[in-house]
Amino acid sequence: MKTMKALSMLAALSMLACTAGCSGNTEAKNDKPAEAKTEAATEAVDVPELDGYSLLWNDEFSDSALDETKWNYEPHEPGWTNEELQEYTTSTDNVFLRGGKLVIKAIKSEKNGKDYYTSGKVTGQNKTDFTYGKVVVSAKVPEGQGLWPAIWMMPKDESFYGQWPKCGEIDIMEVLGNDVSTAYGTLHYGEPHGEQQGTWGLTGQTYADSFHEYSVEWEPGEIRWYIDGNLYNTANDWFTAVQGEDEKPYPAPFDQPFFVQMNLAVGGTWPGDPDATTDFDKAEFEIDYVRVYQKPEYDTNVKKPEKEFRQALEDGNFIFNGDFSEAEDLTDDVNWKFLLFNGGEGAAEIRDNMIVITSEKEGTEDYSVQLVQPDLPMIKGKKYRVTFDAYADEERDIIVCVSAPSAGWIRYLKDTTLKVTPEKQTFTYDFEMKEKDDNNGRLEFNLGHRGSTATVYISDVRVEEIE
């Protein structure tokens, strides 16, 4: 059995060049035995032991200032990425320790007569890099439109497999300040851009109310995401490649040293900009601790799992329960799923061989009120037809598409706006699959942000292959 010895933090501190994981070797030896503890991995805090793991390094933020043997400040100008508004600074106004917590604070001021935002970002690059392990972070997020806290990981040598997304990215936690009841865990990779994302929602509380524990278990052939011990996302079939070239050997790009980083962004393409409701006095992202554990060794003799493609029903339909003849739990990941995001409020139920979607608030995005069915097999070069019946209590718009949640949310069937009326109509859309094979196409009906909350009725849904 091929194994990869766990890279100790001491080795990471003493090596600025890529370690064996970055160079592509399948075995790397520590400068010290895996069980040896470094001074950096000890704190006067009762850090829990995890079965099968040793503590590699941790920070309980119990000092008076940020420990710069573990963390870097990473300043950036506004608009550096994702059209974000903040300047990341090295100021202790934006990054400081208070009461045993790391605080990353976003500040609103004025510059040249316009609103100006500063915030903080800290990274462990070249100081606490590691290859494979379990990352555990306790944090409390701020609430407010346009605030975007994140705990994530990037490779020490971003250029080894190529710039983002080819290099890979592991997002341990992201929460949007305008919807603090939902947390996201995401994997980015590939070229074309691949993405796998899971969400964990809270009921009756939010991630801004109290501290929650976010963790990732990163192993050679699998990455798993947890919140408060609940497993909510698993990935094991990623890839990376340069456009037009063969894929790199699996499990690239997640076979090289990565580092942990944390930041609080303001604005950007995903959360949108802050508005008059955003309270910057409370715009603080608090981190109680960061702990990284590692197993003594990891089996790197792993193979990428073969994709399993859904088979059509006997009548050729790839949609399961497309006639809504069976009752379903619309909150699970089997067949139909009803979702609410970004201020959308509503409900869905199956009755009389149709699904009835009621909206109370339309939300701020098309997908704020959404009905989906995932796991559709999309094969390059084949043609498909989407058909369904729909009507509404009063005339209104909805959007239909076939999306790619695992391939950067590109559209196989483009976002198509259609008008539904009180009279039932049959809608038909044909498209050709031009991208690489995907076993996770997703049919979407998006009812949010359309200027109406009229109830919609959908029935007889089909996705089938055509000549």
Image (spheres, rainbow, N blue to C red):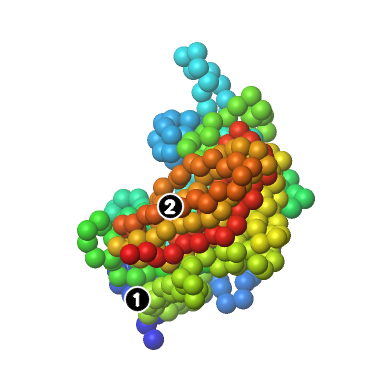
Is 397 located above or below residue 333 in the figure?
above
Q: Percent from the top left, x then y, of residue 133?
A: 50, 67
Write down the quadrant of residue 282 in the picture. Answer: top right
Q: Which residue extends farthest top?
A: 113
Which quadrant would the C terminus be assigned to in this image?
A: bottom left
Check the picture and name the quadrant holding the N terminus.
Answer: bottom left
Pointer 2: residues within 10 angstroms few (<14), some, or many (20+)? some
Q: Position of residue 348 (x, y in %)?
A: 69, 53
- Give the image quarter of residue 179: top right
State the residue position of label 1: 27
Q: Is residue 341 left or right of residue 436?
A: right
At horizontal 68% and vertical 66% (from top left) the residue drawn is: 328
Q: Earlier in the sequence, mark 1 or mark 2?
A: 1
In the image as oriented, which residue stretches furthest toward the front? Answer: 423
Percent across and percent down for residue 10 are 44, 63
Label 1–label 2 contact, CB within 8 A: no
Q: Which residue is mark 2?
A: 429
What amino acid type is highlighted by mark number 1? Glu
> From the viewer's perspective, is 213 left or right of 154?
right
**Could you say which is closer to the camera, residue 193 or residue 308?**
308
Please name the amino acid that badge 2 sits on.
Tyr
